[in-house]
Image (spheres, rainbow, N blue to C red):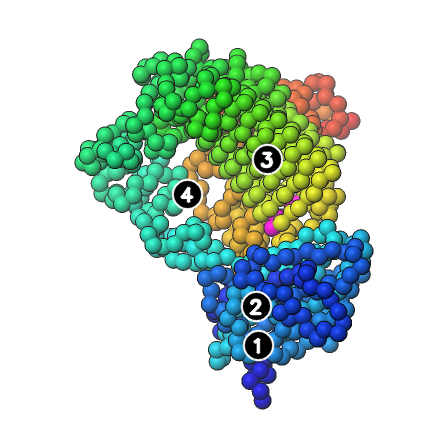
Amino acid sequence: MSRVLTAFLILTASGSFALGGVNEGGTIVVQALSEVEYTSDQETYCEAAPVPSDCADLGTELPSDDGAIHAWSVLAAFPPDASPRLSGLVFGVDYNDEGVVIVDHGMCGNFMLPDNDWPDPGTGVAVTFNPAQESHVTEAYWFAGYAYPGRDTYFRLAAHPWQGAEFVDDAVPGVIDQIADFGELGFGNALGYLPCPDAAGACCLPSGVCELQREVDCAGTWLGSSHSCDPDPCVWGACCIPGSECRVLTEVECLGLGGDYLAQYPCESNACDAATGACCFEDGTCQVRTEAHCSVDRGEWTWEGVSCSPEPCGNEFYRVEADGSGDIPTIQGAINAAADGSVIELGDGVFSGDGNRGIDFLGKSIVLRSGSGDAAACVIDAEGEDHVLYFRSGEAAETRLQDVTVRDGHAQEGAGIFIDGASPTIQGCVFETNSGPVGSGIFARNSAVQVEDCTFRNNRGAVFYAIDCAEPVAVRGSRFVANSEAPTAFFASYASVDFEACTFWGNLVSDSCIHVRHGNLSVRSCTFVRNLVSSTHYGMIDVFRGDLDISRSILAFNDARYPVTSFTGDVVLSCSDVFGNSGGDYIEDIQEQNGRRGNISQDPLFCDLEAGDLRLDPDSPCAPGPAHTVTACERMGAESRGCSPLATGSLAHGSALSTEGTIGTDSFAGQATSGSLSITKVAPNPTTRQVVVAFESPAQSHVALEIYDAQGRNVATAFSSEFAPGGHVRTVDLGELGIPSGTYYLRISNGHEQSQERVVLLR
């Protein structure tokens, strides 16, 4: 028996051989041989075009309207840090044979064993090589064919119908590795899919050990392929977690729990017993230390709670307290006195009154931030009388607002922050209970705003409004939660917009959650859950006269006529999950994109949807891992993988997410996290007139029950009064309130938390 045939038999008997070898993490992809002219007298098209050493350089699209026969090849691609030895592979094909016609094909190896009907859709082939191939990109097969004119269709690689999808090396016995993902060739306007494998990077294991692993294999925190384990990024140190004792953890674990990390300090040194602040050294560097540690290290300690980002050392420094003490009595007074490069630190408390609202940055390159770094503890409150803050004198990205709550602004434009002709950086801020029709949270005109890690919740009116912005508007790591009485949570006109790692939860809007006109929109690694969009014309995400690119995102359980709409622009989804939306999932402008470029339609399996914990269960189809569809797509959505207990202050704790109702579904259990304001029952539902509303109040507080229609408009207030801690029951007569039949939302709130349930009124 020949060596080639022996290798093939080893390949097909994979069940008796070891898994996990030199070909691990490899994918199979398609290369469009666009510059190659097909002729029937040419015997093979292997090596008809140079094979790039980098998988990312492969083309994956061919035309469908030129009347020509085109050639394309199938290649095995391996991670850049791998040392492959490819002796054989098994794969299949899948395509629409009413749109694609294959006229010729052949292998690029030494031996093959095809199915009887190969290469019909749903059939497969095995190919072997002698000697084993060691390239990171290796040709395995070629095809020639065409798509019918005007057809936007695909040719997709897949698993063999009965042998699976595997690589084998030349060891004896052969070692089997599963093919991690499959490429796709697009014809016409259909886009291809190119799943190039990633290199290994630093993985911080729960034990604190750093190992080089690929993201799909990392059982801890993966820092990316650009991080190595030398120097070690998983160093142990004291972690000071609010409300908890000092714990020795790695930096990534500490920050993940919302703690302050002190590198290489043991807990025995009582590192968490004393307040920390920025310590400035003679060389101009800054490190966070306790005052005693700073003195021992021969540095100059600044102030309790001062951080090193942005750099305070060498800059003018002002401390402002809510009671008027500190270096200067008011925030505006400190800005008036400050020079470029100054840092203004705010103590914890509520800043209000003259000098603490309508605050103007006056074009200065300064930093205004909370000293504690806790936005919930440091509040600038306009008390419904003015804008909270202005940037309107050419402020640039060096001007920063950090870690404060912007509350109760009221204005026609930019109630929270009004920005005109400026480009400040806004980080770690909370925008809540601001009101106004145009930009209740932020209004930006002729600006290039950078918003990072902010929360917009319980605002009324279009929350973030950007117009005529020549530079892109970037929103990263931010949350839009329970905003209402608005056509949209985010609106932009004549501006390009980039959303990354953002969450939209429980917003009540009449048009769309994100609406961009005359500009392109990119949405990466975002999560959209239980938003109500009452429009029958717009999607939850909508673009007019611009292109829309959505990748690695989750759109699930939303009450919307369409998930996505676009007028006169291209819509491309990749590595995304669209599931359980009331109007349908892959419909209208995205109706042919399910199953392509890594897109799926499966239950995301959030850790606790009712409690607002949108992290991914380890078995989620949106989480990377063996046998999951997103192996080559990385994680989908904005939240992390794993359902360990959440720290206070995380996404599902201490925010409206913990008590938000169940918008977008027909099942209302009224569940909420313990100790939160919550509606526990609404009955009967549907009703013809009266409903009994049961709710729990965690503390003595003023509680209001408001009624919203399907467009997110406040139509009535059922009650607004003081309640003691504990359970309460109230009867609400919808008929007496003059409310016509229809679908409504009962929203209960105490100024800090809220919960809501849907009720149907029949006549």
Image point (30%, 40%), residue name: 262
Residue 472 picture quarter: top right
Q: CA distance from mark 1 to mark 2?
A: 10 Å
Disc 2 packing (10 Å; few <14; some 14–19; many ≥20): many
Spatial CA distance of label 3 from label 4 is 28 Å
The question of residue 350 being in magenta is answered with no
The residue under label 4 is 256
Q: Which residue is mark 1?
A: 129
SS for callout 1: strand
Mark number, residue 138:
2
Instruction: Give coordinates of residue 505: x percent, y percent.
Output: 58, 36
Rounded to the nearest whole Å, what is the CA distance between mark 4 and mark 2? 41 Å
Residue at the (45%, 58%) spot, across then down = 200
Q: Within the image, what quadrant is residue 587 found in?
A: top right
Q: Which residue is mark 3?
A: 497
Q: Which residues are magenta?
A: 575-580
SS for callout 3: strand
Q: Residue furthest bottom?
A: 1
Q: Is residue 747 above or below residue 18?
A: above
Quadrant in which the C terminus appears: top right
Task: Where is residue 43? Give x, y as percent.
Answer: 70, 75
Mark found first going from the N terminus, 3 or 2: 2
